[in-house]
Image (cartoon, rainbow, N blue to C red):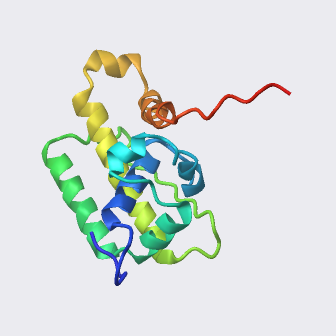
Amino acid sequence: MGDSRRRPQIATRTVVRAVVVMFLSRRGSLHALEQTRPSAFWARWLGQEMPSADSIGRICSRIDVSDVRASVHQAYSRLKRMKALEPPVHGLMQAVVDGHETTAKPTALLVFFLFAMLCLNVFMAFYRRNLKPAARKAVSMLHIAQLIASELYSAIRQGPARAPI
């Protein structure tokens, strides 16, 4: 995936990976994701410090939407071919997009929506194909998402203990 920046200081790949974690860990916004910046997880996952919420939003607004669409289409086609996506009984899928700023650029909202669809498909495939039926009966999808989120918070280093006042 590429974007329209001339000399990027932050790689598009870094931003995409951070946004994927935001969706998979069910963070409600970029600001909620930014609260996890002290986590050692980011150094392992991104190979560098996580960019700020403002930088992620700005870079997502410059990402080429056709590249994201192609990635979503490729992932969906592959998952469908592997029979990793099971259609719901009612045949409908639900999606909710919540823009946190009224001044957000339409391109950024579209990019976030497409990333959300990509993450949903990958998560559904993981849940269906990688978990044994007994494990699927024992835990919900919400529980699995919470485990992913807990990985972020468990890796945050605790600051120095404060003396009681």
Q: How many marks?
A: 0
Residue 53 x/y as whole percent: 54, 61
Residue 104 place in picture, x, y as percent = 57, 73
- Above or below residue 48? Residue 36 is above
Q: Nearer the viewer, residue 90 or 61?
A: 61
Which residue in the rendered view is the most extreme toward the bottom?
A: 6
Q: Is residue 19 left or right of residue 127?
A: right
Quadrant that contains the N terminus: bottom left
Please tell me which residue lies in front, 137 or 68.
Answer: 68
Residue 62: quadrant of the picture: bottom left
53 lies above or below 38: below
Coordinates of residue 108 in the picture (x, y in percent) = 47, 71
Quarter of the picture holding the C terminus: top right
Q: Which residue is painted at 24% across and 62% down in the image? A: 71
Q: In the picture, residue 68 is in which quadrant?
A: bottom left
Q: Which sits in the foreground, 134 or 65?
A: 65
Indicate left or right for 126 with 61 as reference.
Answer: left
Q: Residue at x 39, y 16 (%)?
A: 138
- In percent of width and height, residue 23 lies at 44, 49
Q: Quick check: can you spot residue 91?
A: no
User: Residue 26 or 13: which is nearer the viewer?
Assistant: 13
